[in-house]
């Protein structure tokens, strides 16, 4: 199973020191994970900076970030920062970007949150040109760019789109290397995410898109307790409009119905259901149901190895 380890900040954005992220990446590589990703929250530490430090203590594990909000950061500036980390990481960076949520962009940053799809289409077009060719000449509704960035021997940075709705999934397949979801159950992956991403890839002639399904996971034989903790811990995701629409479409009541919990056989089966639905990776986010997350992480590492 291709399981992505979670490093650094937790799913609810509980901050941890940058040194912890570096240590987490080192531990994930030694545990046998092939990929280790961190979240980026606007109110916490900068993810790319932390991954640059993590690159210095690792040599094999893929280092990813999901996802950096696009509105607050100009695409040329983000391309420069990401390419720098890619050089330091020896080609191991995966860059996740997305439009975030209205409450983050308008309330926190004071920016206009309109035209999300058109905005992201232009953003990805600019990033793609800079990563592929090192220059971009672009004039659109949201951006006008005449930029050259010299990347000395740097590998192109794989792009992943943080997607919830069908249109964003399609765009991720068309202009990026795939999509990253959060709280999307197997049914939604199979019915919406995978086919829409593949449809987008077909439009642009890209190879099969990567589908990274982010999901809470807890190894706990008391599944009733684990579900209660999941419902409480991840309650906010059932209230955010984008996630609420996705859950309604998938026919689930809330985060507890999506989280993977139970004993080893149940968790293994739950993870497999995502791969069967079309996910290429599961980004497992361990959460504490009362006994810590160490056993969950060890079990996930064994499956990933």
Image (cartoon, rainbow, N blue to C red):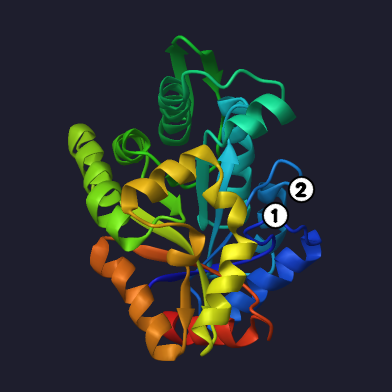
Q: Secondary structure at mark 2?
A: loop
In this rendering, the answer to whether 278 lies above or below 209 is below
Q: Which residue is depicted at the point 29% across and 37% down?
A: 170
- Is residue 239 visible to us here? yes
Residue 5 lies, in percent from the top left, at 54, 70
Picture coordinates of residue 248, whole percent (x, y)? 38, 47
Q: Which residue is drawn at the image coordinates 61% and 51% (left, top)?
A: 236
Q: Is residue 2 left or right of residue 223?
A: left
The quarter in which the N terminus is drawn is bottom left
The x, y position of residue 116, in whole percent, is 47, 25
**On screen, residue 234 above or below 95:** below
Q: Nearer the viewer, mark 2 or mark 1?
A: 1
Q: Is residue 64 left or right of residue 52?
A: left
Q: Quadrant of residue 13?
A: bottom right
Q: Earlier in the sequence, mark 2 or mark 1?
A: 1
Give x and y (percent) for residue 279. 32, 61
Q: Is residue 180 left or right of residue 277?
A: right
Few, some or many residues within 10 Å of mark 2 (<14, 14–19, 20+): some
Q: Residue at x 72, y 58 (%)?
A: 53
Q: CA distance from mark 2 to mark 1?
A: 8 Å
Residue 156 visible? The answer is: no
Q: Quadrant of the C terminus?
A: bottom left
Disc 2 + disc 1, Cβ < 8 Å: yes
Q: Which label number is shown at residue 13? A: 1
**Residues packed near mark 1 inside 10 Å, few (<14), some (14 to 19) or many (20 plus):** some
Label number found at residue 44: 2
């Amino acid at each position: 199973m291709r399981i992505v380890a979670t490093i650094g900040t937790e799913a609810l954005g509980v901050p941890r020191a940058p040194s912890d992220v570096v240590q987490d990446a080192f531990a994930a590589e030694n545990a046998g994970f092939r990929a280790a990703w961190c979240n980026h929250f606007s109110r916490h530490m900068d993810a790319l900076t932390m991954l640059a430090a993590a690159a210095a203590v690792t040599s094999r594990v893929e280092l990813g970030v999901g996802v950096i909000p696009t509105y607050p950061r100009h695409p040329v500036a983000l391309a420069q920062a990401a390419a720098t980390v890619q050089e330091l990481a020896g080609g191991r960076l995966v860059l996740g970007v997305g439009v975030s949520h209205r409450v983050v962009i308008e309330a926190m940053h004071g920016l206009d949150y309109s035209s999300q799809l058109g905005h992201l289409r232009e953003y990805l077009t600019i990033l793609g040109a800079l990563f592929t060719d090192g220059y971009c000449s672009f004039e659109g509704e949201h951006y006008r760019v005449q930029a050259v960035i010299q990347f000395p021997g740097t590998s192109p940075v794989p792009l992943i789109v943080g997607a919830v709705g069908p249109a964003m999934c399609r765009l991720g397949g068309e202009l990026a290397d795939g999509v990253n979801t959060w709280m999307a159950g197997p049914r939604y992956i199979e019915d919406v995410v995978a086919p829409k991403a593949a449809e987008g890839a077909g439009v642009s002639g890209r190879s099969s898109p990567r589908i990274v399904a982010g999901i809470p996971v807890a190894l706990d034989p008391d599944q009733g307790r684990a579900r209660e903790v999941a419902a409480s811990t991840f309650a906010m995701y059932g209230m955010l409009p984008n996630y609420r629409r996705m859950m309604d479409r998938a026919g689930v009541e809330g985060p507890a119905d999506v989280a993977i919990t139970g004993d080893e056989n149940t968790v293994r089966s739950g993870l497999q259901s995502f791969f069967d639905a079309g996910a290429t990776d599961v980004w497992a986010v361990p959460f504490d149901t009362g006994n810590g997350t160490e056993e969950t992480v060890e079990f996930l590492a064994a499956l990933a190895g």
